[in-house]
Amino acid sequence: MIVGGGLHGLATAYYLAKTHENSDVAVLERNWIGGGNAGRNTTIVRSDYHLPGNREFFEHSLELWENLSHELNYNVMFSQRGYVSLVHSPSSEDERARAFNIMRMTGSDGEYWPLQRVRKEIPLLDFERARFPIHGAFCQPRAGTARHDAVVWGYARAASALGVDIIQNCEALGFERDGCSVDAVMTSRGRIGLNKLGLSVAGSTSRLWEMLGLHDLPLESHLLQAFVTEPVKPILNHVIAFIVGGQDFYINQSDKGGLVFGGDLDGYKSYRQRGKPGVAADTAASALSILPSFARAQMLRGWAGLCDMTMDGSPFICDTPLDNVYLNAGWNYGGFKATPAAGTFFADLIQNRRPSDVISRFRLDRFARGHCIDEHGLGPIPKAHG
């Protein structure tokens, strides 16, 4: 039983059926598949991570993305337009250079663009009056974007064809426990017995964790907003991002022409899926600080995804204190791009009851053991990890 019919839940079910030939799988979704965080993100795919564990995981995920349309026989619209991370200071340049050097040393791709190259590739940027002057950029050419709805339906269709049951409008309301194992899930459509249980519910993880009678889950649920403008002519050929002055910002142009952008978390714990207006103003100001020509674009809509933020900014794919329950959670900002690898490794964990070497660090007890995976060096502050 997989609880959660988002990208990770559907991917897990697909790989259980495809790789492990186990089609005795049901996916429960309380609303419609892809109705949660799967449809509430900015669809960026990249692998510019450098710490052991994250590095191997996200690079493997990018490799899977490159063949995903063929794998699923469904066009997920993966566009490798390149991910460009702007640098605004010598210290920022040193930090990004370190990460990209590790990427190059471990078989990935990465380029440093001096200012002249940035001017040539992205002439729309404000090189003369920007509040934070642009010194150059680092680019991962293989990175890009995909269409979130297409990924949902690609995995759902492929999993269903292999015999997986996808049950929509079926909310998990509680669990039947027998000591250290779970025998059934009580749903809005009745009781369903199970042999193994996988939790893949994004921002609702802590709620189901308490339903299982467990406590002290080391994560917090925060809102992350994103926005899209009215469609405009093709004008932005890359994904552009920067972190400066305490502000995180990223933008790309969708295939329909809208400018899709986002920034920081709202900064307070919530389950509302409706963000505060101040973040919209701050994020729009960040956009105009480097792309002033977008000032007249009309905002079409905004949305808020519910993110599980861990203490060190890295995820969990692991077993739990219960014998037959497995956890996939804590994806912070990175859930969308992790989809293929998360599904692959979570399916392997559930099927074989032991983690592969790649995810062996993504354990619940890593904080007690002092083995944090603090990619950004921000310490145990969930809302600080971008």
Image (cartoon, rainbow, N blue to C red):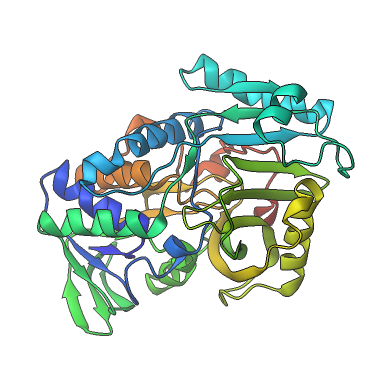
Name the image quarter holding residue 56: top left
- Which residue corresponds to the image point at 40% horizontal and 64% vertical from the top-left? 201
- Give the answer, above or below, for where 66 lies relative to 18: above
Residue 239: where, in percent of width, then height? 58, 42
Residue 150: where, in percent of width, then height? 33, 56
- Give the answer, above or below, for where 173 lies relative to 124: below
Quarter of the image for the N terminus: give it.
Answer: bottom left
Name the image quarter holding residue 244: top right
The reply to whether residue 104 is in sight is yes
Residue 24: where, in percent of width, then height? 11, 58
- Give the answer, above or below, for where 7 lies relative to 5: above
Judged from this view, the residue extending furthest toward the top is 105
Q: From the viewer's side, name the closer residue of 310 and 65.
A: 65
Left or right of residue 295: residue 372: left
- Which residue corresponds to the image point at 57% horizontal and 68% vertical from the top-left? 304
Left or right of residue 41: residue 344: left
Left or right of residue 343: residue 296: right
- Number of marks drawn: 0
- Which residue corresponds to the image point at 40% horizontal and 70% vertical from the top-left? 35
The reply to whether residue 360 is in sight is no
Judged from this view, the residue extending furthest toward the front is 233
Name the image quarter holding residue 111: top right
Residue 161: where, in percent of width, then height? 11, 56
Left or right of residue 260: residue 178: left
